[in-house]
Amino acid sequence: MAGNEWINGYLEAILDSGAAAIEEQKPMVDLRERGHFNPTKYFVEEVVTGVDETDLHRTWIKVVATRNARERSSRLENMCWRIWHLTRKKKQLEWEELQRLAKRRWERELVRKDATEDLAEDLSEGEKGDTVSELIHAETPRVSFHSNASSLELWSDDKKEKTLYIILISLHGLVRGENMELGRDSDTGGQVKYVVELSRALAKMPGVYRVDLFTRQVLSPEVDWSYGEPTEMLTTASEDADGNDVGESSGAYIIRIPFGPRDKYLHKELLWPYIQEFVDGALAHILNMSKVLGEQVGGGQPVWPYVIHGHYADAGDSAALLSGALNVPMVLTGHSLGRNKLEQLLKQGRQSKEDINSMYKIMRRIEAEELSLDVAELVITSTQQEIEEQWGLYDGFDVKLEKILRARARRGVNCHGRYMPRMVVIPPGMDFSSVVVQEDASEVDGELPTVIGGTDGSSPKAIPTIWSEVMRFLTNPHKPMILALSRPDPKKNITTLLKAFGECRPLRELANLTLIMGNRDDIDEMTGGNASVLITVLKLIDKYDLYGLVAYPKHHKQTDVPDIYRLAAKTKGVFINPALVEPFGLTLIEAAAHGLPMVATKNGGPVDIQRALNNGLLVDPHNQQAIADALLKLVSEKNLWHDCRRNGWKNIHLYSWPEHCRTYLTKVAACRMRHPQWKTDTPGDEVSAEVSSLNDSLKDVHDMSLRLSVDDKASLTGSLDPVASSSGEPDVQDQVKRVLSKIKKPETNSKENEGVKLENVPSKYPILRRRHRLVVLILDCYDSNGLPEKKMAQIIQDIFKAVRLDTQNAKFTGFAISTAMPVSETMEFLKSAKIQVNEFDALICGSGSEVYYPGTYTAEDGKLFADPDYASHIAFHWGYEGLKKTIWKLMNPEGEQKSPCAEEDVKSSNAHCVAYFVKELSKAKKVDDLRQKLRMRGLRCHPMYCRNSTRMQVVPLLASRAQALRYLFVRWRLNVANMFVIVGETGDTDYEELIAGAHKTLIMKEVVTKGSEALLRTTDLRNDIIPSDSPLIASIKGGATPEEISEALKALSKASL
């Protein structure tokens, strides 16, 4: 290769960088061609393949096509440098990944040992032995298959009383009940179909009254108008099986909640900053619906959700917050997991972790999945492999520790607040209503000639179009058909299947091969990986001369798939899934339903499917000969083929929707059922009930998508139509006048009517429940000792004056203060600032661990009592003593006891808050690191640094200053959308949770000089949590006058989503 002598130097560099490792995984390459070394062949066929860079092949084509020798040499040199750098980068990333995995395994073993020792401290010697044996047993893999039903009582069809309200959440993509646009983009795929069908199936189950599927409302011109409809009915069941009326709101519905930019369709990676807006909108709908259902089937009492089920990470994050706000059980289905995707992308070596996070927002997704694991009572997976190999990557789940904790719980032994969610395998359901099993019909015995026209000259019957498309490739279409149906993805292993078929002469003589590889117009326009597979398929067909034996149609519709299965079954064919790893294998179930035996990979979900259906053979996808042998065995042995066919039909009901839902409800029923149960009874009067109905309406949340009526029934099917009311329709006008008249003339004592402040009116219940608006002060202004700065008092007084300048709204507006200080220090601060505590309707203290109502729960000496309902509300998964001991160990490791990083702050601690002084800030662990170590030990909580990084406080998982505001909404029906949250530019480490949502946020700049956010996390995720373009967030300069603050609040009050 004259002029290219330099290439040997680059070749040596590539080999030195690790190309030898690539060669070890591939057959030896003949580097000699026609008696001389051919490095270009080596680069294109070996190094390029090893690097897996999709556009290198196209670059090589351009290089070859270049006629100018000097230009070709220059391009070839550049290409070689690219390959060299890519190979080095890939090896470096692989090494870093190995180091990370080794460190993680070591940490996991250390944590497990630590947790086991802590759990054994309160046991007798005999019980300690049991704990050790549990750990050993947990480390031994189980071979036997256990039924999903276990010893639980199965959900009975005899449940006549339909009272359950179930909520499903699937946020991304385009969701509708009919004409689903599956495949329109990467967000609108199988998950959309799954959640819609699950909603319909659950609504038909005995005991279930209503199912709501929450998703995003999209009013973009880019998509169909139907995605902007607030409500879509999926099923209705106004009568039960006995003909009895079951209520007008029963059935399954899609509820579209607006969040994020209303006029834009956003991909899932861009939805993260708007999650809190969705949570507040969904909460408003749930509270209204609980009242409506209470009137229909609850005997006048609210019907709370039976369970909230999140699908995927974004919905899991939302479900966790809703579960915490409502205190109801949460279920999670991951569908696809962030940690697993991150590992796969890192292994490819094309992108660094930072690049992956920038493109996929992967760290925000993983954090959401970890939070979902914290809250979820139940995690539903499709396969056992998903539990062990995918969820096992998460800090919040350890298979071995979960088994130990479950065993202790069964024996009634204290787990010290440690908790692991229960993982259960429930395969997705399928609708088999269109599948007709006709085992005795002549057509199922492979008599395809009777359908397409036989040799006797009979005319052919009308056949599906797709059959013609397939059969035009085949010389003899009557031979048994081996069917593969998948995308042309390298992981689907289609090329190995084709090699197995091409190199097995008996199989070629006995059968045809049909490859349904998606849809294509032009291979050159396809993505690199898919195009590469298709080109290889075409080359292999030519290499083995398989013309007339292999069908590979370019197009097919989703509605053609059942016909394709039927064609294969009529020829006594076999379905094959040779993927390297198959997470579940839905096509295997579809094929079995149509009477096709299967050959499938032994890696992943097909193992569970074969165990359940017993309708085929499993193979090693890397073993070409094993694939050929399995196919030949099924095609040639007719008795075996019929046995597999019958077994598939006999057991296919295990994957039906009724069976899925029965198992689902059985598992959910085993969870610890919980819902709001207020200890302090608050009988409502007629005014508060109707005002609440109006305020809770999503019309008051600035058109948060639901059309609610203001009549006594508050039906979801009605709407308060402003056009109708202005045009003089008597019914609507009468309703509005009646409600407004009661608002103007509240039934209170005369002092109120004389203008006396509401704060001074003694009441058994918090005056908060009568407020229309609430201004919440969350200004974390602390000095270096963690004490409130003097300027905070002046700012509070200015805000009071600013609100009272608006005389129209002042008397309906209340105040609350939310702080990390305990109630005693909060009272001292207010006293020193000469601010009456009764100026506030609520005090949220201890970083959201306690809520107080001055003037309501107050002793004669002025001492405040915490809301007992809130205390019970946040107690979920809270283990005070075990948590306290573990945090002390983590904050003060062995060897540093003489100069501890933290000391207990007894004054700031309470029953739901463990507080510490931070003595050595440089040694303090960041919140994400601390939370990771606690999760790995099974401890679920909410750690945070506060008060200018001088304190570290740990509160229950469901407690926070943000969630306390949602509690006020749920408990006292004070709508979050009518709250004005005033914060500084920075604050405690829970600061970012307080910004986003349906409430209005006013940021006062230059007020908080230093916060604690530097101790929050290693990776900055603020842009994925706080929306940069929300109309509900405004700012004002520091030192603003009361008049300026008042104008800012007025402007915010007009803002809407």
Image (cartoon, rainbow, N blue to C red):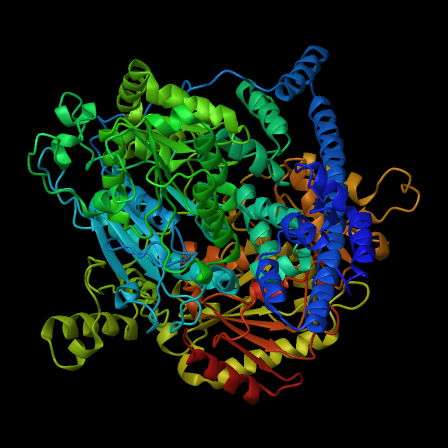
As drawn, 611 above or below 292? above
Residue drawn at the location 28% of the way across and 22% of the way down = 645
Image quadrant where residue 890 sits: top right
| Residue 1054 picture location, percent across and down | 41, 81
Q: In the displayed structure, does residue 751 sit left or right of residue 951?
A: left
Residue 929: image location, x then y, percent: 72, 49
Q: Nearer the viewer, residue 899 or 236?
A: 236
Identify the residue shown where x is 65% and y is 21%. Answer: 139
Task: Please state which of residues 101 and 833 is positioned toward the viewer in this rendering.
Answer: 101
Q: Residue furthest left?
A: 458
x and y, in percent, of residue 361 in the image: 58, 59
* Residue 185 placement, left or right of 67: left
Indicate the quadrant containing the C terminus: top left, top right, bottom left or bottom right. bottom left
Q: Nearer the viewer, residue 526 or 135?
A: 526
Q: Quadrant of residue 970?
A: bottom left
Any part of residue 605 in sight: no
Assign the N terminus to one quadrant of the image: bottom right
Q: Is residue 587 above or below residue 125?
A: below
